[in-house]
Image (cartoon, rainbow, N blue to C red):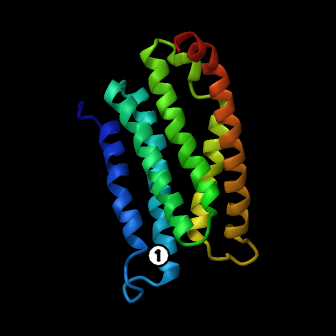
Amino acid sequence: MPYNIPNLLTWGRILLIPLFVGVFYLHHDWLAPHQQNLAATAIFIVAAITDWLDGYLARTLQQTSAFGAFLDPVADKLMVAAALIMLVQLDRADTIVAFIIIGREIAISALREWMAKIGAGRSVAVSFLGKVKTASQMVAIPMLLYHDPLSWFDPQRIGTWLIYLAALLTLWSMAYYLRMAWPHMAEKT
């Protein structure tokens, strides 16, 4: 494993996951519910920023590596899955939404792995639709984590709309990736 700043940031993001989940298990004498929401939101946002930062630094410092290319999406998916599971447990997101998003991530990761093995990995490269889906869920999740109203702004309501949009885009992008992979799948089976 290459030891460089981008990979260390990715490992840091993975190490944030138990801290993120643990915030919600602290006794209310240590952190009031509002403080738990704020802390979890801040941790998730830091993780999202490090996701962008590690990619930027890898390209800028020319420190890209096969290991980093593998680990980065794994870290992203673990953090998003942890957040969605916590949101379901806190009754801030529907189970079906979490299932759709997490299930799609697993299915498309497996599809990408298989396509790479047969030499057709470019067929399922990240699309613009996938980026819009990711942006929608990366804005929705902190809003749902924060949960508490801010004056006239209701993050729970906006976050709920955005997470449903993310689930819809998740299904749409999955259909897109499967359609792109279909000729290769039909040929190899």
Q: Pick out the residue farthest to the front.
A: 189
Q: Quadrant of the N terminus?
A: top left
User: Which x, y percent locates residue 83?
Assistant: 50, 59
User: Which x, y percent locates residue 5?
Assistant: 31, 38
Front in this rendered view, residue 88 or 17: 88
Q: Pick out the residue farthest to the right.
A: 152
Kindly tell me whether residue 65 is visible in this rendering: no
Kindly tell me whether residue 172 is visible in this rendering: yes
- Element type at mark 1: helix
* Residue 171 to residue 122: above or below: below
Front in this rendered view, residue 134 or 123: 123
User: Which x, y percent locates residue 157?
Assistant: 73, 67
**In the picture, residue 20 is in which quadrant?**
bottom left
- The residue sitting at 52% across, 69% down in the picture is 89
- The residue sitting at 63% across, 27% down in the picture is 177
**In the picture, residue 11 is in which quadrant?**
top left
Disc 1 residue crowd, few under 14, some 14–19, many 20+, Cα 10 Å: many
* Residue 1 to residue 187: above or below: below
- The residue sitting at 38% across, 57% down in the picture is 17
State left or right for residue 69 relative to residue 104. Answer: left
Q: What's under tag 1, amino acid-wise? A: Gln
Front in this rendered view, residue 94 or 62: 94
- The residue sitting at 47% across, 67% down in the picture is 40
* Residue 129 to residue 97: above or below: above
* Residue 110 to residue 24: above or below: above
State left or right for residue 41 relative to residue 12. Answer: right
Across the whole image, how many numbered discs are drawn on residues?
1
**According to the image, label 1 marks what residue?**
36
User: Which x, y percent locates residue 143?
Assistant: 62, 64
